[in-house]
Image (cartoon, rainbow, N blue to C red):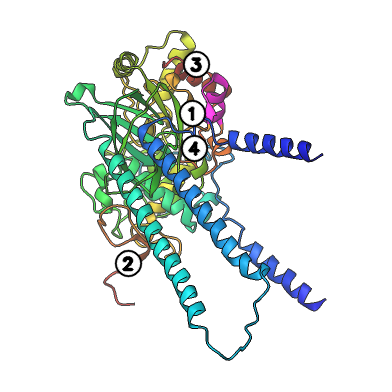
């Protein structure tokens, strides 16, 4: 009797390995998850305007699948055309500690969705909302702001910079703790 | 009763072997490479079956035979020992001859396969993507270079050279009715020569596990007479058909102002994405999403409305469209013959 119970337990443990990672590929509402107004200036009474937080921000940022999808889309949509793999060119660098419009997921999402003055086009309607969140999460990983356990660890092409899970955090780089 | 059993067995075997026929079977060859391989498969299987039966008989014989008791057990019989040695050495020799023979057969079959496309006039680049096939017809005249997806039209009776590569992971191109399989490797070009003896449609399948939708990565080789093939090529080179109805016109506008345009190309419009299948003549193809759905208005709508339900994990995202918008886009795509 006892060996049978042990066998059953072992079989249960082995079968538990068949559980696949659940990937969130079907958004509840694809476009326009929030109708935040587009900020046209960073001048706010009392400092920075608190951006409304979105529950996708936290869950996408720590998720390996969404980060790697963001990496793929960054290449597919030719973000490098202006931002040059994050190093910056026509557009600002994405791997340093400087954030013109704020470093939060919500700010980067708003930047991609609504565009910014002096060149950043609006991708509203052109990129589904979840894919914008994926891009925002990936952009944050370029300056070492993503959990290293979730950030992409390799590149299919020649590496332009260390893999995202080894990127130093730009905000603390070169400063003594 | 015995007769009934044998008839039933024969029928069952015939039905079972029927599964080996059809548009995707290495045992139903439709080209010189597949014929060579099918012959090799049958010869190997037949010869190995004969060897297996002989070994089984050799094993069973000593078990069946009554052991002979020598009169004096301690006296060595040099003659019997010699006989045994001769039997074993003969078996070893025969095994060596058979193995070397099979190796040579395999070698010469490979030479035949390699020679099929040595005078190929048509070169097609096949690039594997998760989970579809990009097909590019090469031509010395740049304006005649043609890009399409998932369906490979070839002239029947002519050798065709396929250049295989991949952009993401390793895939494998396998059209069993026409040839053996060959991997598509990122950053590396493999060459596979195929030839279809007769016009027909032959199904192929990715044969190297490449991710969640590996099973739904099918391709079709459509072999046609040369004249029909040339006409097809010329048709495909034309820019996309202009939308005929008001609904289709609205669909074109929506296509160009929704996420579709970020990845797909439609020749003759500003849509120029190259990371997803070229849709210039999408409605002229027989299937959607690499053999997942047959081409129809309903399936087009289903695929656009919920790609993650039809092919979970595919890189086509769910796009939020109203019913009217979906209908308009489908009406437009349906007209892209």
Please tell me in which quadrant of the rendered image residue A151 appears: bottom left
Label 3 or label 4, whichever comes before in sequence order: 4
- Marks 1 and 2, Cα distance to the nearest angstrom? 44 Å
Give the SS element for disc 4.
Answer: loop
Q: Nearer the viewer, residue A93 or B223?
A: B223
SS class, disc 3: helix
Mark 3 vs mark 1, CA separation in Å? 15 Å
Q: Nearer the viewer, mark 1 or mark 2?
A: 1
* Residue bearing mark 3: B331
Q: Secondary structure at mark 2?
A: loop
Same chain? Circles 1 and 4: yes
First in sequence: mark 1 vs mark 4: 4
Chain letter belonging to callout 3: B
Label 4 sits on residue: B27
> Within 10 angstroms of label 1, few (less than 14), some, or many (20 or more) residues?
some
Does B117 appear above or below A22?
A: above
Task: Look at mark 2 in the image and give the residue it sits on.
Answer: A168
Percent coordinates x, y for residue B21 in the rendering: 54, 32
Q: Which residues are magenta?
A: B293-305
Distance from the alpha carbon under mark 2 to that under mark 3:
50 Å
Residue B308 lies in magenta, yes or no?
A: no
Q: CA distance from mark 3 to mark 4?
A: 42 Å
């Amino acid at each position: 009797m006892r060996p049978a119970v042990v066998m059953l337990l072992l079989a249960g443990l082995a079968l538990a390995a068949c559980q696949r990672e659940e990937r969130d590929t079907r958004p509840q509402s694809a476009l326009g998850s929030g109708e935040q107004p587009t900020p046209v200036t960073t001048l706010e009474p009392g400092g920075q305007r608190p951006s409304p937080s979105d529950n996708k921000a936290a869950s996408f940022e720590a998720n390996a699948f969404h980060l790697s999808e963001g990496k793929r889309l960054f290449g597919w949509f030719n973000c490098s055309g202006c931002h040059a793999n994050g190093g910056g060119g026509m557009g600002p660098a994405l791997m340093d500690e400087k954030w013109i419009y704020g470093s939060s997921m919500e700010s980067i999402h708003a930047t991609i969705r609504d565009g910014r003055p002096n060149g950043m086009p609006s991708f509203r309607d052109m990129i589904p909302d979840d894919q914008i969140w994926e891009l925002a999460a990936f952009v944050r990983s370029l300056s070492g702001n993503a959990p290293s356990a979730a950030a992409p660890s390799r590149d299919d092409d020649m590496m332009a910079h260390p893999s995202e899970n080894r990127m130093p955090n730009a905000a603390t780089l070169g400063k003594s703790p | 009763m015995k007769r009934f059993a044998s008839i039933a067995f024969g029928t069952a075997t015939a039905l079972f072997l029927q599964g080996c026929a059809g548009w995707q079977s290495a045992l139903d060859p439709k080209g010189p490479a597949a014929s060579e391989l099918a012959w090799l498969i049958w010869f190997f299987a037949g010869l190995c079956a004969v060897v297996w039966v002989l070994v089984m008989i050799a094993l069973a014989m000593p078990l069946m035979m009554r052991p002979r008791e020598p009169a004096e057990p301690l006296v060595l019989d040099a003659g019997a020992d010699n006989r045994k040695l001769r039997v074993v050495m003969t078996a070893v020799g025969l095994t060596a001859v058979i193995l070397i023979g099979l190796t040579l057969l395999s070698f010469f079959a490979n030479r035949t396969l390699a020679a099929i496309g040595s005078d190929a006039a048509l070169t097609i680049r096949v690039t594997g993507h998760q989970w579809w096939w990009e097909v590019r017809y090469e031509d010395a005249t740049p304006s005649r270079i043609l890009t399409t997806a998932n369906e490979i039209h070839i002239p029947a009776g002519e050798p065709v050279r396929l250049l295989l590569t991949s952009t993401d992971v390793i895939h494998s191109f396998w059209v069993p009715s026409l040839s053996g399989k060959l991997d598509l490797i990122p950053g590396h070009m493999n060459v596979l020569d195929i030839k279809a003896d007769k016009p027909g449609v032959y199904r192929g399948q990715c044969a190297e596990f490449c991710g969640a939708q590996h099973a739904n990565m099918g391709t079709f080789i459509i072999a046609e007479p040369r004249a029909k093939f040339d006409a097809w090529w010329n048709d495909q080179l034309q820019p996309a058909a202009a939308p005929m109805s008001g609904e289709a016109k609205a669909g074109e506008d929506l296509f160009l102002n929704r996420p579709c345009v970020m990845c797909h190309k439609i020749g003759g419009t500003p849509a120029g994405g190259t990371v997803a299948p070229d849709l210039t003549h999408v409605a002229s193809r027989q299937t959607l999403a690499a053999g997942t759905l047959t081409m129809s208005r309903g399936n087009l709508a289903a695929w656009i409305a919920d790609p993650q339900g039809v092919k979970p994990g595919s890189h086509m995202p769910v796009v939020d469209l109203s019913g009217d918008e979906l209908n308009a886009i489908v009406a437009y795509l349906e007209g892209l013959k």
